[in-house]
Image (cartoon, coloured by chain):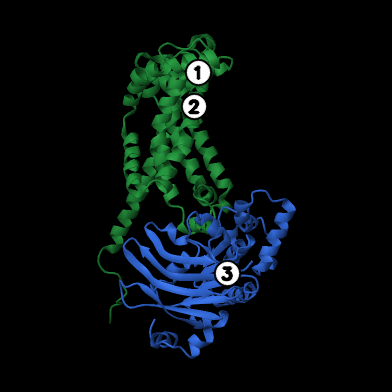
């Protein structure tokens, strides 16, 4: 179910402002790809264009193509709702629905796509998803309790369980650990390594060690200055980005000379 | 001897104290007013409760005098709420989540303006404009749905019926519900809206999943404020409704509400009649209080899932 993403000549605009310019890259299935770069370089904006979540912001639009195994996300007649149900997203701050129990949170996406699900199927799916998110053991005795009662790291894993419950083809993560403590971060990173076996994972991170630990491929984004669009500077194997970068600005960034 | 540099100089402390006293006084004032109103109602209404049955208006005791107008009050408020709550929520959702920003702004002001119209004007509008307009509809209802007791004919030829009064009340309550729920809808965390959208929810599914559950306590509060207005509304009902005995049909003249009953009879009332009307006011006060307590209970029942933790 894991699929390849091909981005061709993608430009992202907020109204008249060009936020990201001319990105072309290929993301392999069953791999973890990290996007790194200084704040405001457009990496989160670009990530959002991969499941059309940027359209939530008024005035945001793209030019160019994003192909999911050859199917254009921006083709005519493509509904963003369908795109998002196939390409899941995990956000910077954990956002379980506060009015739903842990169980209902996991099932939220499934109930959207397929309204009728038998109670025993639902039980199986909840267990499978929570196990997939390494959360089952911690919450199995309180599935009816509200999701907002969990710790930050547990909430984030609940969001991952919710995302994988719908069996998406790609999982996008927008700085999933930036609000978490080191122990919870480690739990999420272990989980990402697990997810890689079944899913195409794309992660935006400010933490370069994290990119080095979890990803095979890394894309470095940068901006020339305020008001300039973000650009993809370099995209290659993670080991090359960190040990043997081709571009001077990549080297400056990963060695901590700026950003 | 060096003086302690930490010791306080100047008058910062005393102004703090004055501010504290001012807030305390304001808080006490509310209690005093509330207590004096409640005491007034109780003391003044005692004669009505103690009077002989045949002395009271209607000649069968206070309770048989009051219960038809209690029912009338509840019917008028129920019609208003049944119409205004869903419409108000949809209007608020339209403004907060569907309308283009500029249109939403203008629309919001318009709704606020609707809330600023005095009730006597609503009453006049209902009496002169709306009631005659509705007579044909009432004739149709009586002819086609007359077998349902609430639409039993013959329909009023002036249109000054309970249903008209309820509709006027709904129009008056609508801006309250819309304005309040719109504020709540706008406060829905972006985080939760995006969570729903990112799973492939449509706009409406997102609203069901993230906005409405978040806004639920607010919707109940808004409805209760609206209900408070509908229960207590006096002028509009007094003008629109042609009052009479309690009847099941909503399209004949008849029925009465507590507030309108008090307003219409107060100028000529003295002694026991005055006491009766004040006792009717006490009953209205108790109903409103009960409604508010019920609302609080409903809201607190789901506290654990409110997202406040």
Q: Specify the label residue B76 is tagged with.
A: none
Pointer 1: residues within 10 angstroms few (<14), some, or many (20+)? many
In this rendering, is residue A100 above or below A204? above
Q: Colour of chain B?
A: green
Mark 1 touches mark 2? (CB < 8 Å): yes
Pointer 3: residues within 10 angstroms few (<14), some, or many (20+)? many
In this rendering, is residue A77 above or below A216? above
Q: Position of residue B13 (x, y in %)?
A: 30, 62
Given the current orientation, which residue lies at the most extreme bottom position? Answer: A244
In this rendering, is residue A121 above or below A198? above
- For the C terminus of chain B, the quadrant is bottom right
Q: Nearer the viewer, residue B280 or B255?
A: B255
Q: Nearer the viewer, residue A65 or A127?
A: A65
- Tell me the SS state at disc 2: helix
At 50% from the left and 37% from the top, the residue drawn is B292
Q: Position of residue B188 (x, y in %)?
A: 46, 53
- For the N terminus of chain B, the quadrant is bottom left
Q: Chain of mark 3?
A: A
At 53% from the left and 72% from the top, the residue drawn is A202
Q: Colour of chain A?
A: blue
Marks 1 and 3, how far apart at CA: 58 Å
Residue on which disc 2 sits: B79
Q: Nearer the viewer, residue B171 or A19?
A: A19
Tell me which label, 1 or 2, sits earlier in the chain: 2
């Amino acid at each position: 179910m894991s699929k390849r993403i091909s981005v061709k000549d993608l430009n992202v605009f907020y109204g008249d402002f060009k936020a990201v310019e001319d990105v072309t890259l290929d993301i392999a299935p069953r791999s973890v790809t990290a996007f790194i770069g200084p704040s405001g370089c457009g990496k989160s904006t670009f990530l959002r264009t991969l499941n059309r979540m940027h359209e939530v912001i008024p005035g945001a639009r793209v030019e160019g193509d994003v192909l999911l195994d050859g199917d254009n996300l921006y083709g005519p007649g493509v509904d963003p709702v369908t795109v998002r149900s196939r390409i899941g997203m995990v956000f910077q701050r954990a956002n379980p629905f506060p009015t739903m129990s842990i169980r209902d949170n996991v099932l939220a996406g499934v109930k959207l796509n397929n309204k009728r699900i038998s109670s025993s199927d639902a039980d199986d799916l909840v267990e499978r998803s929570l196990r997939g998110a390494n959360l089952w053991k911690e919450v199995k005795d309180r599935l009816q309790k509200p999701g907002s009662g969990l710790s930050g790291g547990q909430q984030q894993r609940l969001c991952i369980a919710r995302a994988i419950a719908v069996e998406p083809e790609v999982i996008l993560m927008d700085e999933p650990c930036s609000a978490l403590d080191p122990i919870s971060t480690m739990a999420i990173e272990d989980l990402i390594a697990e997810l890689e076996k079944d899913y195409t994972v794309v992660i935006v991170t400010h933490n370069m060690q994290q990119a080095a630990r979890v990803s095979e491929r890394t894309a470095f984004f940068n901006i020339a200055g305020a008001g300039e669009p973000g650009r993809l500077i370099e995209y290659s194997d993670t080991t090359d980005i960190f040990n043997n970068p081709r571009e001077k600005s990549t080297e400056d960034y990963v060695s901590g000379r700026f950003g | 001897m060096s003086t302690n540099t930490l010791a306080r100089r100047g008058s910062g402390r005393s102004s703090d104290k004055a501010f504290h006293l001012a807030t305390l006084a304001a808080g006490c004032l509310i209690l005093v007013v509330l207590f004096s109103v409640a005491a007034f109602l109780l003391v003044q209404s005692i004669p009505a409760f103690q009077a002989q049955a045949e002395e009271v208006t209607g000649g069968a005791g206070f309770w048989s005098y009051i219960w038809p107008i209690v029912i009338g009050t509840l019917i008028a408020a129920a019609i208003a709420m049944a119409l205004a709550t869903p419409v108000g929520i949809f209007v608020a959702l339209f403004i907060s989540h569907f309308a283009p920003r500029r249109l939403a702004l203008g629309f919001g002001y318009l709704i606020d303006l609707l809330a600023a119209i005095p009730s006597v004007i609503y009453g006049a509008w209902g009496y002169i404009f709306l009631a005659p307009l509705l007579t044909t509809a009432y004739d149709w209802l009586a002819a086609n749905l007359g077998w349902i007791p609430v639409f039993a004919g013959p329909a009023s030829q002036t249109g000054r019926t309970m249903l008209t009064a309820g509709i006027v009340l709904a129009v008056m309550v609508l801006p309250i519900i819309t304005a309040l729920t719109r504020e709540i809808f706008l406060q829905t965390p972006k985080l939760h809206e995006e969570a729903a959208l990112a799973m492939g929810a449509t706009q409406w599914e997102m609203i069901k999943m993230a906005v409405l559950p978040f806004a639920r306590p607010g919707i109940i509060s808004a409805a209760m404020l609206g209900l408070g207005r509908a229960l207590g509304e006096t002028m509009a009902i007094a003008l629109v409704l042609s009052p009479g005995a309690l009847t099941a049909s909503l399209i004949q003249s008849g029925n009465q509400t507590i507030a309108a009953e008090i307003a219409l009879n107060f100028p000529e009332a003295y002694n026991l009649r005055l006491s009766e009307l004040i006792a009717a006011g006490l009953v209205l006060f108790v109903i409103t209080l009960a409604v508010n307590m019920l609302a609080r209970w409903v809201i607190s029942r789901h506290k654990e899932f409110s997202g406040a933790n």
